[in-house]
């Protein structure tokens, strides 16, 4: 497999072009040679001018057109949503063909994406569909806290319904396999409860007993080192302080809030369960500062570093 990293530019009206060119400019010559940006060259040239990045983009861009582009910064536009989709689609196809080893995604705008007729809940749903998979898993990874989600962009009511023993077990397995891949010999996994205090023996609901307990039992029977359900109000503190290597969160906010509190600029979004590798920044398009050169590319650097780790592992 290739060790080339493919960065998708994201929504052309957002900060994605700026953080992509800043990251490329700061790379070593060796790393830069193993990097391509999937986007629009004219937009990226504007981002170079906006940021003052010291980089010549010749040879580093997979150039794709944008209807009416370059588009204005910071404006919701279905043409931007369509372009963002096509950048990702091209990178996915190249990853499937082995031309790149990992896709790194800059932020997209879900409203623009859907206005363009691409009806996905975000990157993970889009990548699942593009690669022909039934489902995927979102892992948020930082140095001291890693969280994988049973569900993400659905209502809380739907999330509880989706937390079946089978789905929770599949999430545990995916997290366990990924941590082993990146060097954990025997990952210590904890599963968060659904209800306050895991239902308090049925006082606050029976979902934990009916849905979570069987999943944990099945995972343990497979030899996975997993505990749960554990009350979420204490679990993340324990994991952050070293008691566990991975937390299984039952729904979007249960996992996102704690990791964004402790690693807002450094947490990396990783898609598991796909035939390709993908990492991403864990922030949005920031239309309010797009085009100003103010966007911080720290999170992009973290996503790229994680991607290189995965690409190197695939090669071996």
Image (cartoon, rainbow, N blue to C red):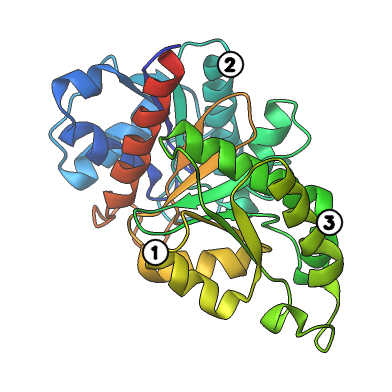
Query: Whole-Å distance between the Cαs marked 2 and 3?
Result: 31 Å
Q: Which residue is drawn at 52% across and 23% down?
A: 91
Q: Which of marks 2 and 3 is in front?
A: 3
Judge the density around disc 3: few (<14), some (14-19), many (≥20) Cα neighbours within 10 Å: some
- Asked where in the image residue 7 lies, by quadrant, the reply is top left
Q: Earlier in the sequence, mark 1 or mark 2?
A: 2
For label 2, count other residues whose C-alpha is less than 10 Å away and answer few (under 14), some (14-19) or many (20+): some
- Is residue 38 at all visible to an observer of this figure? no
Determine whether 101 is above or below 231 in the image.
Answer: above
Q: Is residue 221 above or below residue 86?
A: below
On-image quarter of the C terminus: top left
Q: Nearer the viewer, residue 173 or 289?
A: 173
Position of residue 212 measured from the top left corner of the image (x, y, whole percent): 77, 62
Mark 2 in CB contact with mark 3 (< 8 angstroms) = no
Q: Mark 1 points at which residue?
A: 288
Tell which of 195 and 228 is nearer to you. 228
Q: Quadrant for residue 296, please give it.
A: bottom left
Side of 56 where 278 appears, left or right: right
Image spot of residue 314 (x, y percent): 46, 19
Compute the Cα span from label 1 to label 2.
35 Å
Q: Earlier in the sequence, mark 2 or mark 3?
A: 2
Q: Mark 2 points at which residue?
A: 96
What residue do we see at 23% from left, 23% from top?
32
- Give residue 53's position: percent from left, percent from top: 16, 39
Residue assigned mark 3: 164
Question: Please, what secondary structure does the residue beneath circle 1 have?
Answer: loop
- Does residue 198 sit above or below 111 in this rendering? below
Q: Judge from the rendering whether residue 313 lies leftward or rightward of residue 196; answer left or right.
A: left
Label 1, residues with CA under 10 Å away: few <14, some 14-19, many ≥20: few
């Amino acid at each position: 497999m290739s060790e080339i990293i493919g960065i998708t530019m994201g929504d052309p009206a957002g900060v994605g072009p700026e953080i992509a060119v800043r990251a490329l400019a700061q790379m070593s010559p060796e790393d830069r040679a193993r990097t391509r940006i999937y986007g629009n060259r004219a937009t990226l040239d504007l981002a170079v001018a906006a940021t003052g990045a010291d980089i010549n983009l010749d040879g580093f861009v997979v150039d794709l057109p944008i209807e009416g582009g370059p588009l204005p910064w910071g404006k919701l536009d279905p043409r931007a949503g369509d372009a963002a989709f096509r950048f990702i689609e091209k990178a996915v196809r190249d990853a499937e063909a082995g031309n790149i080893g990992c896709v790194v995604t800059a932020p997209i705008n879900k409203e623009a994406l859907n206005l363009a007729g691409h009806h996905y809940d975000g990157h993970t749903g889009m990548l699942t569909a593009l690669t022909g998979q039934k489902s995927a898993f979102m892992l948020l990874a930082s140095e001291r806290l890693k969280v994988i989600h049973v569900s993400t962009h659905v209502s809380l009511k739907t999330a509880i319904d989706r937390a079946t023993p089978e789905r929770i077990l599949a999430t545990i397995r995916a997290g366990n396999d990924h941590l082993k891949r990146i060097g954990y010999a025997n990952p210590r996994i904890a599963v968060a409860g659904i209800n306050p205090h895991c239902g308090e023996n049925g006082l606050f609901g029976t979902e934990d007993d009916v849905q979570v307990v069987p999943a944990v039992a099945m995972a343990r029977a497979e030899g996975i080192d997993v505990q749960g359900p554990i009350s979420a109000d204490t679990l993340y503190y324990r994991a952050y302080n070293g008691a566990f290597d991975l937390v299984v969160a039952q729904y979007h906010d249960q996992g996102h809030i704690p990791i964004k509190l402790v690693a807002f600029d450094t947490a990396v979004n990783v898609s598991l369960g796909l035939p390709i590798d993908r990492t991403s920044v864990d922030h949005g398009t920031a239309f309010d500062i797009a085009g100003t050169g103010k966007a911080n590319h720290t999170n992009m650097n973290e996503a790229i570093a994680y991607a290189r780790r995965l690409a190197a592992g695939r090669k071996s």
